[in-house]
Image (tube, rainbow, N blue to C red):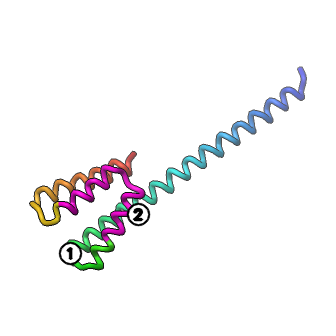
Amino acid sequence: MDWTLLIGGLGIGTLVTKIVDYFLTKKSSKEALLYKEKKEVYFGLLDALHKAAVSPSIENSKNFALWQTRVQLFGTDEVSMSVQGIIDTNDGPKSLRDKHFGELIEGMRKDLNS
């Protein structure tokens, strides 16, 4: 048996394992960062929505608009559309607004659990 082939084979196997581990770790880190970003954006949006509802002001409206933009950047289309639905029904029937709010929460939950 040729020991150089055996040692060379082990070396290549180790190298392949290291490369695969590197890419898996990189992918996992990227997914963790994206999850963290989405979570922060969704909590920030909910906080801004609360402030705009409890204490309506130009400042709180602008803050909510900023968080809405962040949702458009990091969130799903479903969540963005629910936010827009809440805005569109601001002066409309409470039942329709509540429906959009429920869709917002459900969309966030689905996005964060996927």
**Disc 1 secondary structure class:** helix
At label 1, the amino acid type is Val
Q: Position of residue 30 (x, y in %)?
A: 54, 52
- Outermost residue, front side: 88
- Outermost residue, top side: 1
Q: Magenta stretch: residue 69 in it?
A: yes
Residue shown at 27% from the left, 51% from the top: 106
Residue shown at 50% from the left, 53% from the top: 32
Q: How many residues crowd around disc 1 within 10 Å: few (fewer than 14), some, or many (20 or more)?
A: few
| Vertical side of 85 occupied by 8: above or below | above
Q: Is residue 43 left or right of residue 26?
A: left
**Disc 2 secondary structure class:** helix
**Of callouts 2 and 1, which one flags the residue occurring earlier in the amino acid sequence?**
2
Query: Dot 2 corresponds to which residue?
Result: 40
At label 2, the amino acid type is Glu
Q: Magenta stretch: residue 52 in it?
A: no
Q: Is residue 111 left or right of residue 18?
A: left
| Vertical side of 90 occupied by 35: above or below | above
Q: How many residues crowd around disc 2 within 10 Å: few (fewer than 14), some, or many (20 or more)?
A: some
**Contact between labelled residues 1 and 2, with CB atoms less than 8 Å apart:** no
Query: Dot 1 corresponds to which residue?
Result: 54
Q: Nearer the viewer, residue 13 or 1?
A: 13
Residue shown at 31% from the left, 53% from the top: 79
Residues drawn in magenta = 64-88
Q: Is residue 43 left or right of residue 82?
A: right
Cα distance in 3D space between marks 2 and 1: 21 Å
Q: Position of residue 34 (x, y in %)?
A: 47, 55
- Give the quadrant of residue 114: top left
Q: Position of residue 62 (x, y in %)?
A: 31, 74
Q: Nearer the viewer, residue 29 or 100?
A: 100
Residue shown at 30% from the left, 49% from the top: 78
